[in-house]
Image (cartoon, grey):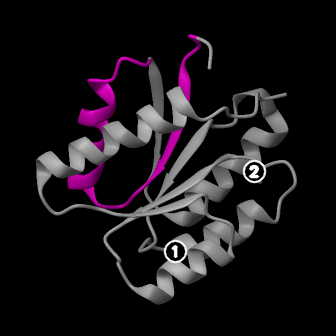
């Protein structure tokens, strides 16, 4: 990926996890812009508006919690992956749930990966850093059109 700023959509309702994720991404070597939506409906509305008004500004990556108000992460996955304009956005499920049912459902709805949030703060920061390193330094992402 070039040196352009990475756009990350964080869909998370837990204030503590938002702060930790922002802290980990702030310390990154990669310039990034993080957009935060605190429920599933807000995330879908944001993406639908963006795909019409500024399709070249769609996020490069989405970090999605499963346990969200209004529309849960599984419903968000269904909406995004069924929309041709949005389905290319890589979605990392980053959640406290380690339920086999949640894992199976997320992958059946085309999540790109599923990560259970570590309880330890340092482990959480390390995982977030590794997510960014992998998805922006190792993986070749599609360019926005």
Task: Provide the residue designation for mark 1.
Answer: 70
Please give the name of the residue rendered at 67% of the width and 77% of the height, measured from the top-left corner: 108
Q: Going by the image, does 96 lie left or right of 59?
A: left
Q: Is residue 120 magenta?
A: no
Residue 86 at x, y = what percent? 77, 50
Task: Provide the residue designation for mark 2.
Answer: 48
The reply to whether residue 20 is visible in this rendering is no
Q: In this view of the protein, which residue sits in the foreground, 74 or 55?
A: 74
Residue 46 at x, y = what percent? 64, 48
Please give the name of the residue rendered at 56% of the width and 10% of the height, measured from the top-left corner: 3
Pointer 1 local density, CA inside 10 Å: few below 14, some 14–19, many at least 20? few
For residue 91, the mark is: none
Q: Is residue 19 magenta?
A: yes
For the N terminus, give its image quadrant. top right
The reply to whether residue 29 is visible in this rendering is yes
Identify the residue at the far top of this view: 3
């Amino acid at each position: 990926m070039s040196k352009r700023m990475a756009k990350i959509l964080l869909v998370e309702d837990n204030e503590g996890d938002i702060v930790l994720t922002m802290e980990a991404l702030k310390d990154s070597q990669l310039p990034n812009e993080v957009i935060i939506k605190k429920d599933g409906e807000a995330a879908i509305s944001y993406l639908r508006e963006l795909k019409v008004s500024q399709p070249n500004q769609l996020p490069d990556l989405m970090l999605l919690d499963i346990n969200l108000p209004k529309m849960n992460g599984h419903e968000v996955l269904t909406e995004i992956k069924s929309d041709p304009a949005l389905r290319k956005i890589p979605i990392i499920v980053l959640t406290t749930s380690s339920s086999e049912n949640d894992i199976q459902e997320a992958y059946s709805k085309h999540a790109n990966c599923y990560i259970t949030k570590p309880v330890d703060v340092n482990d959480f920061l390390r995982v977030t850093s590794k997510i960014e390193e992998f998805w922006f330094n190792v993986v070749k992402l599609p360019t926005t059109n």
